[in-house]
Image: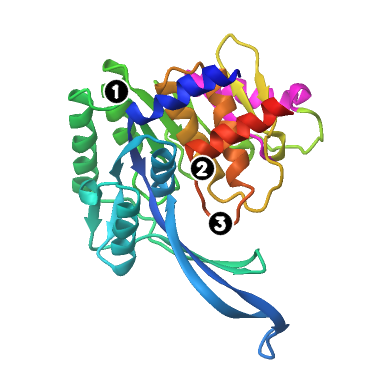
Amino acid sequence: MKRKRLSQIVDKFCDKRIAVVGDLMLDVYIWGKASRISPEAPVPVVQVKKKSCCLGGAANVMRNVVTLGGRVDAYGVIGADPDGEEIKRLFSDYAIDPSTLSVDRTRRTTKKQRIIASAQQLLRVDFEDTEKIGELIRQEIIDGVKELIEQQALDAIIFEDYGKGVLNEKMLEQIIESANKNNIITSLDPNPGHLHRVKGLSVMKPNRSEAFAMTGTFPQENGMPVEKDFQLQAVAAQLLEEWEPDYLIISLAAQGMALFRQGKEMVVIPTKAREVYDVSGAGDTVIAAFTLALCAGADPVEAAEIANHAAGIVVGKVGTVTVGKEELLESFNREIQL
Protein backbone atom coordinates (compact mmCIF):
# COMPACT_ATOMS: atom_id res chain seq x y z
CA MET A 1 0.00 0.00 0.00
CA LYS A 2 1.31 3.44 -0.88
CA ARG A 3 2.08 5.81 1.99
CA LYS A 4 -0.44 8.42 0.81
CA ARG A 5 -3.26 5.88 0.66
CA LEU A 6 -2.37 4.51 4.10
CA SER A 7 -2.43 8.02 5.58
CA GLN A 8 -5.82 8.70 4.00
CA ILE A 9 -7.27 5.65 5.73
CA VAL A 10 -5.57 6.00 9.12
CA ASP A 11 -6.38 9.71 9.35
CA LYS A 12 -10.09 8.83 9.22
CA PHE A 13 -9.87 6.50 12.25
CA CYS A 14 -10.53 9.43 14.58
CA ASP A 15 -13.95 10.02 12.98
CA LYS A 16 -15.17 6.47 13.57
CA ARG A 17 -17.32 5.22 16.44
CA ILE A 18 -17.54 1.51 17.20
CA ALA A 19 -19.66 -0.36 19.75
CA VAL A 20 -17.90 -3.41 21.19
CA VAL A 21 -20.15 -6.07 22.72
CA GLY A 22 -18.83 -9.13 24.50
CA ASP A 23 -16.98 -10.77 27.36
CA LEU A 24 -14.96 -8.31 29.43
CA MET A 25 -11.85 -9.47 31.26
CA LEU A 26 -9.20 -8.12 33.57
CA ASP A 27 -5.70 -9.30 32.70
CA VAL A 28 -3.37 -9.39 35.69
CA TYR A 29 0.37 -9.95 35.39
CA ILE A 30 2.64 -10.97 38.26
CA TRP A 31 6.21 -10.20 37.20
CA GLY A 32 9.17 -11.79 38.92
CA LYS A 33 12.31 -13.88 38.80
CA ALA A 34 12.60 -17.66 39.08
CA SER A 35 16.01 -18.85 40.25
CA ARG A 36 15.27 -22.02 42.21
CA ILE A 37 12.89 -24.97 42.52
CA SER A 38 10.50 -25.22 45.44
CA PRO A 39 11.34 -27.89 48.08
CA GLU A 40 7.58 -28.49 48.40
CA ALA A 41 6.93 -29.53 44.78
CA PRO A 42 8.84 -29.63 41.46
CA VAL A 43 7.82 -26.09 40.51
CA PRO A 44 9.81 -22.85 40.24
CA VAL A 45 9.74 -20.32 43.06
CA VAL A 46 8.97 -16.86 41.67
CA GLN A 47 10.25 -13.84 43.55
CA VAL A 48 7.64 -11.20 42.75
CA LYS A 49 8.93 -7.81 41.60
CA LYS A 50 5.71 -6.10 40.52
CA LYS A 51 2.06 -6.56 39.57
CA SER A 52 0.25 -4.92 36.67
CA CYS A 53 -3.31 -4.95 35.34
CA CYS A 54 -4.73 -4.25 31.91
CA LEU A 55 -7.95 -4.66 29.95
CA GLY A 56 -8.54 -8.06 28.38
CA GLY A 57 -11.08 -9.89 26.24
CA ALA A 58 -13.65 -7.56 24.71
CA ALA A 59 -12.17 -4.76 26.82
CA ASN A 60 -8.85 -5.24 25.01
CA VAL A 61 -10.62 -4.81 21.66
CA MET A 62 -12.06 -1.57 23.04
CA ARG A 63 -8.69 -0.15 24.00
CA ASN A 64 -7.21 -1.23 20.65
CA VAL A 65 -9.89 0.79 18.87
CA VAL A 66 -9.05 3.79 21.07
CA THR A 67 -5.25 3.60 20.70
CA LEU A 68 -5.69 3.39 16.94
CA GLY A 69 -7.69 6.61 17.10
CA GLY A 70 -11.32 5.49 17.12
CA ARG A 71 -14.10 6.00 19.67
CA VAL A 72 -15.74 3.19 21.62
CA ASP A 73 -19.08 2.42 23.21
CA ALA A 74 -18.60 -0.40 25.71
CA TYR A 75 -21.16 -3.16 26.30
CA GLY A 76 -20.47 -6.10 28.58
CA VAL A 77 -20.92 -7.43 32.11
CA ILE A 78 -18.81 -7.03 35.25
CA GLY A 79 -19.38 -8.20 38.79
CA ALA A 80 -19.95 -6.00 41.82
CA ASP A 81 -16.38 -6.60 42.97
CA PRO A 82 -12.92 -4.95 43.08
CA ASP A 83 -11.98 -6.44 39.69
CA GLY A 84 -15.02 -4.83 38.10
CA GLU A 85 -14.05 -1.52 39.65
CA GLU A 86 -10.53 -1.97 38.29
CA ILE A 87 -11.92 -2.42 34.77
CA LYS A 88 -13.86 0.83 35.14
CA ARG A 89 -10.75 2.58 36.44
CA LEU A 90 -8.71 1.33 33.48
CA PHE A 91 -11.45 2.52 31.14
CA SER A 92 -10.75 6.06 32.31
CA ASP A 93 -7.16 5.73 31.04
CA TYR A 94 -8.58 5.35 27.52
CA ALA A 95 -11.50 7.79 27.86
CA ILE A 96 -13.98 4.91 27.58
CA ASP A 97 -17.31 5.62 29.27
CA PRO A 98 -18.11 2.76 31.74
CA SER A 99 -21.72 3.87 32.26
CA THR A 100 -23.02 1.47 29.58
CA LEU A 101 -21.55 -1.59 31.33
CA SER A 102 -23.98 -3.92 33.09
CA VAL A 103 -23.28 -5.04 36.66
CA ASP A 104 -24.34 -8.54 37.70
CA ARG A 105 -24.11 -9.05 41.46
CA THR A 106 -24.47 -12.82 41.06
CA ARG A 107 -21.20 -13.35 39.16
CA ARG A 108 -17.53 -12.50 39.36
CA THR A 109 -15.71 -10.23 36.98
CA THR A 110 -13.63 -12.47 34.71
CA LYS A 111 -9.95 -12.27 35.64
CA LYS A 112 -6.94 -13.95 34.03
CA GLN A 113 -3.87 -13.87 36.26
CA ARG A 114 -0.53 -14.73 34.67
CA ILE A 115 2.80 -15.44 36.39
CA ILE A 116 5.74 -14.15 34.32
CA ALA A 117 9.41 -14.85 35.06
CA SER A 118 12.18 -13.56 32.77
CA ALA A 119 9.63 -12.75 30.04
CA GLN A 120 8.34 -16.35 30.16
CA GLN A 121 4.79 -17.16 31.21
CA LEU A 122 4.87 -19.93 33.82
CA LEU A 123 1.23 -20.18 34.85
CA ARG A 124 -2.22 -18.71 34.27
CA VAL A 125 -4.99 -18.73 36.86
CA ASP A 126 -8.57 -17.99 35.74
CA PHE A 127 -11.29 -16.54 37.95
CA GLU A 128 -14.58 -16.65 36.06
CA ASP A 129 -18.25 -17.57 35.91
CA THR A 130 -19.33 -18.81 32.49
CA GLU A 131 -23.07 -19.29 32.93
CA LYS A 132 -25.30 -17.35 30.56
CA ILE A 133 -26.16 -13.86 31.77
CA GLY A 134 -29.75 -13.15 32.76
CA GLU A 135 -32.26 -12.11 30.12
CA LEU A 136 -32.90 -8.73 31.77
CA ILE A 137 -29.21 -7.82 31.50
CA ARG A 138 -28.98 -9.18 27.96
CA GLN A 139 -32.01 -7.14 26.89
CA GLU A 140 -30.46 -4.07 28.52
CA ILE A 141 -27.42 -4.52 26.27
CA ILE A 142 -29.52 -5.12 23.14
CA ASP A 143 -31.63 -2.03 23.79
CA GLY A 144 -28.56 0.12 24.39
CA VAL A 145 -26.85 -0.92 21.14
CA LYS A 146 -30.03 -0.71 19.05
CA GLU A 147 -30.68 2.80 20.34
CA LEU A 148 -27.27 3.91 19.04
CA ILE A 149 -27.96 2.16 15.73
CA GLU A 150 -31.28 3.93 15.29
CA GLN A 151 -29.61 7.26 16.11
CA GLN A 152 -27.10 6.57 13.29
CA ALA A 153 -24.39 7.11 15.90
CA LEU A 154 -22.26 4.07 15.02
CA ASP A 155 -19.98 3.12 12.15
CA ALA A 156 -19.52 -0.50 13.25
CA ILE A 157 -20.24 -3.10 15.93
CA ILE A 158 -17.72 -5.71 17.04
CA PHE A 159 -18.91 -8.86 18.83
CA GLU A 160 -16.23 -10.52 20.99
CA ASP A 161 -17.14 -14.04 22.09
CA TYR A 162 -14.86 -15.59 24.69
CA GLY A 163 -17.54 -18.04 25.79
CA LYS A 164 -18.29 -16.37 29.13
CA GLY A 165 -22.04 -16.15 28.64
CA VAL A 166 -22.71 -12.63 27.30
CA LEU A 167 -23.52 -13.38 23.65
CA ASN A 168 -26.21 -15.66 22.27
CA GLU A 169 -27.84 -16.15 18.87
CA LYS A 170 -30.96 -14.14 19.66
CA MET A 171 -28.89 -11.14 20.75
CA LEU A 172 -26.66 -11.31 17.68
CA GLU A 173 -29.58 -11.74 15.27
CA GLN A 174 -31.45 -8.73 16.66
CA ILE A 175 -28.45 -6.41 16.60
CA ILE A 176 -27.16 -7.60 13.20
CA GLU A 177 -30.60 -7.18 11.61
CA SER A 178 -30.88 -3.64 12.93
CA ALA A 179 -27.30 -2.82 11.90
CA ASN A 180 -27.80 -4.09 8.34
CA LYS A 181 -30.91 -1.96 7.91
CA ASN A 182 -28.78 1.06 8.81
CA ASN A 183 -25.67 0.10 6.75
CA ILE A 184 -23.51 -0.44 9.85
CA ILE A 185 -20.56 -2.84 9.69
CA THR A 186 -20.74 -5.89 11.98
CA SER A 187 -17.72 -8.01 12.95
CA LEU A 188 -17.62 -11.24 14.97
CA ASP A 189 -14.68 -12.91 16.69
CA PRO A 190 -16.30 -16.34 17.22
CA ASN A 191 -15.81 -19.00 19.89
CA PRO A 192 -15.97 -22.60 18.56
CA GLY A 193 -17.16 -23.86 21.95
CA HIS A 194 -20.23 -21.61 21.85
CA LEU A 195 -21.18 -21.38 18.19
CA HIS A 196 -23.83 -18.84 17.28
CA ARG A 197 -24.95 -19.60 13.73
CA VAL A 198 -25.93 -16.17 12.50
CA LYS A 199 -25.90 -14.70 9.01
CA GLY A 200 -25.60 -11.17 7.71
CA LEU A 201 -22.21 -10.37 9.24
CA SER A 202 -19.81 -8.06 7.46
CA VAL A 203 -16.73 -9.75 8.98
CA MET A 204 -15.96 -13.01 10.73
CA LYS A 205 -12.47 -13.51 12.16
CA PRO A 206 -11.45 -16.88 13.59
CA ASN A 207 -7.88 -18.10 13.85
CA ARG A 208 -6.86 -21.30 12.05
CA SER A 209 -7.66 -23.72 14.88
CA GLU A 210 -10.98 -21.99 15.55
CA ALA A 211 -11.94 -22.13 11.87
CA PHE A 212 -11.30 -25.87 11.76
CA ALA A 213 -13.18 -26.44 15.03
CA MET A 214 -16.17 -24.48 13.73
CA THR A 215 -16.50 -26.90 10.81
CA GLY A 216 -15.75 -30.05 12.82
CA THR A 217 -12.63 -30.65 10.75
CA PHE A 218 -9.43 -32.11 12.18
CA PRO A 219 -6.50 -29.88 11.15
CA GLN A 220 -3.46 -31.52 9.63
CA GLU A 221 -0.10 -29.79 10.04
CA ASN A 222 1.15 -30.33 6.51
CA GLY A 223 3.79 -27.60 6.43
CA MET A 224 2.43 -26.40 3.12
CA PRO A 225 2.43 -22.73 2.14
CA VAL A 226 -0.96 -21.14 2.60
CA GLU A 227 -1.55 -20.92 -1.15
CA LYS A 228 -1.36 -24.73 -1.34
CA ASP A 229 -3.17 -25.50 1.90
CA PHE A 230 -6.28 -26.97 0.28
CA GLN A 231 -7.65 -28.21 3.61
CA LEU A 232 -7.69 -24.63 4.91
CA GLN A 233 -9.36 -23.45 1.71
CA ALA A 234 -12.05 -26.14 2.06
CA VAL A 235 -12.72 -25.07 5.65
CA ALA A 236 -13.00 -21.43 4.55
CA ALA A 237 -15.41 -22.37 1.76
CA GLN A 238 -17.61 -24.20 4.27
CA LEU A 239 -17.64 -21.23 6.64
CA LEU A 240 -18.54 -18.86 3.81
CA GLU A 241 -21.37 -21.15 2.72
CA GLU A 242 -22.81 -21.72 6.20
CA TRP A 243 -22.33 -18.25 7.74
CA GLU A 244 -22.35 -16.04 4.62
CA PRO A 245 -20.15 -13.21 5.95
CA ASP A 246 -19.02 -10.59 3.47
CA TYR A 247 -15.41 -11.13 4.53
CA LEU A 248 -13.79 -14.07 6.30
CA ILE A 249 -10.39 -13.34 7.83
CA ILE A 250 -8.46 -16.34 9.21
CA SER A 251 -5.40 -15.58 11.35
CA LEU A 252 -2.54 -18.00 10.62
CA ALA A 253 0.03 -17.16 13.32
CA ALA A 254 3.52 -17.18 11.77
CA GLN A 255 2.01 -17.47 8.26
CA GLY A 256 0.12 -14.17 8.58
CA MET A 257 -3.54 -14.22 7.61
CA ALA A 258 -5.82 -15.10 4.73
CA LEU A 259 -8.83 -13.22 3.37
CA PHE A 260 -11.72 -15.14 1.81
CA ARG A 261 -14.78 -13.79 -0.05
CA GLN A 262 -17.56 -15.41 -2.02
CA GLY A 263 -16.62 -15.68 -5.68
CA LYS A 264 -13.11 -14.29 -5.10
CA GLU A 265 -9.70 -15.90 -4.88
CA MET A 266 -8.05 -16.21 -1.49
CA VAL A 267 -5.67 -13.37 -0.59
CA VAL A 268 -2.71 -14.25 1.65
CA ILE A 269 -1.05 -11.51 3.69
CA PRO A 270 2.33 -12.72 5.10
CA THR A 271 3.13 -11.89 8.71
CA LYS A 272 4.90 -8.62 9.50
CA ALA A 273 6.16 -9.74 12.92
CA ARG A 274 9.92 -9.42 13.26
CA GLU A 275 10.00 -11.27 16.59
CA VAL A 276 7.24 -13.08 18.48
CA TYR A 277 7.24 -12.82 22.28
CA ASP A 278 3.56 -13.10 23.19
CA VAL A 279 0.48 -13.74 21.04
CA SER A 280 -1.94 -12.71 23.83
CA GLY A 281 -4.50 -10.30 22.43
CA ALA A 282 -3.23 -10.36 18.84
CA GLY A 283 -6.64 -11.44 17.56
CA ASP A 284 -8.22 -8.51 19.41
CA THR A 285 -5.87 -6.17 17.58
CA VAL A 286 -6.68 -7.75 14.22
CA ILE A 287 -10.45 -7.38 14.50
CA ALA A 288 -10.16 -3.82 15.85
CA ALA A 289 -7.79 -2.68 13.10
CA PHE A 290 -9.62 -4.50 10.28
CA THR A 291 -13.00 -3.10 11.30
CA LEU A 292 -11.67 0.44 11.79
CA ALA A 293 -10.00 0.32 8.38
CA LEU A 294 -13.24 -0.77 6.69
CA CYS A 295 -15.06 2.08 8.43
CA ALA A 296 -12.41 4.47 7.13
CA GLY A 297 -12.97 3.45 3.52
CA ALA A 298 -10.34 0.74 3.04
CA ASP A 299 -11.15 -2.14 0.75
CA PRO A 300 -10.92 -5.59 2.43
CA VAL A 301 -7.41 -6.31 1.15
CA GLU A 302 -6.15 -2.94 2.41
CA ALA A 303 -7.91 -3.52 5.74
CA ALA A 304 -6.29 -6.95 6.07
CA GLU A 305 -2.86 -5.48 5.34
CA ILE A 306 -3.36 -2.83 8.02
CA ALA A 307 -4.60 -5.42 10.54
CA ASN A 308 -1.63 -7.67 9.75
CA HIS A 309 0.86 -4.89 10.44
CA ALA A 310 -0.93 -4.06 13.70
CA ALA A 311 -0.80 -7.70 14.84
CA GLY A 312 2.89 -7.92 13.93
CA ILE A 313 3.58 -5.07 16.34
CA VAL A 314 1.72 -6.45 19.36
CA VAL A 315 3.17 -9.99 19.19
CA GLY A 316 6.62 -8.43 19.50
CA LYS A 317 5.76 -7.26 23.02
CA VAL A 318 5.15 -9.16 26.26
CA GLY A 319 1.65 -9.10 27.73
CA THR A 320 -1.72 -7.96 26.41
CA VAL A 321 -0.82 -4.73 24.64
CA THR A 322 -2.21 -2.44 21.96
CA VAL A 323 -0.87 -0.57 18.95
CA GLY A 324 -1.02 3.15 18.27
CA LYS A 325 -1.41 5.03 14.99
CA GLU A 326 2.20 6.18 14.96
CA GLU A 327 3.53 2.64 15.51
CA LEU A 328 1.31 1.42 12.69
CA LEU A 329 2.58 4.07 10.29
CA GLU A 330 6.17 3.36 11.32
CA SER A 331 5.69 -0.36 10.58
CA PHE A 332 4.57 0.45 7.05
CA ASN A 333 7.40 2.94 6.61
CA ARG A 334 9.96 0.26 7.49
CA GLU A 335 8.53 -2.01 4.81
CA ILE A 336 8.57 0.79 2.22
CA GLN A 337 12.22 1.56 3.04
CA LEU A 338 13.15 -2.11 2.71
Of residues 10 and 277, the one nearer the viewer is 10
Residues at circles 1 and 2 in contact by the CB criterion of under 8 Å: no
| 14 lies left or right of 322 | left
The local crowd at label 1, few if under 14, some if 14 to 19, many if 20 or more residues have their Cα within 10 Å, is many
Q: What amino acid is labelled 3 in the image?
A: Gly
The local crowd at label 3, few if under 14, some if 14 to 19, many if 20 or more residues have their Cα within 10 Å, is many
Of residues 40 and 155, the one nearer the viewer is 155
Measure how far apart labels 3 and 1 are at the Cα level: 34 Å
Camera-side mark, 2 or 3: 2
Percent across and percent down for residue 264 are 60, 10
Disc ID at residue 319: 3
Disc ID at residue 323: 2
| Picture residue at 55% right of the left edge, 35% below the top | 328
Q: Residue furthest bottom?
A: 39
**First in sequence: mark 3 vs mark 1:** 1
Total residue callouts: 3
Q: What amino acid is labelled 2 in the image?
A: Val
Q: Main secondary structure of the magenta part?
A: helix
Disc ID at residue 179: 1
Q: In this rendering, is residue 13 above or below 27?
A: above
Q: In this rendering, is residue 281 above or below 266?
A: below
**First in sequence: mark 1 vs mark 2:** 1
Q: Residue furthest front?
A: 337
| 271 lies left or right of 25 | right
| Picture residue at 44% right of the left edge, 28% below the top | 291
Q: Residue furthest right?
A: 223
Percent across and percent down for residue 178 are 26, 23
Dot 1: element: helix
Residue 252 is covered by the magenta coloring = yes
Measure how far apart labels 1 and 2 are at the Cα level: 27 Å
Please report the bounds of the magenta region as a residue range: 226-253
Measure how far apart labels 2 and 3 are at the Cα level: 12 Å
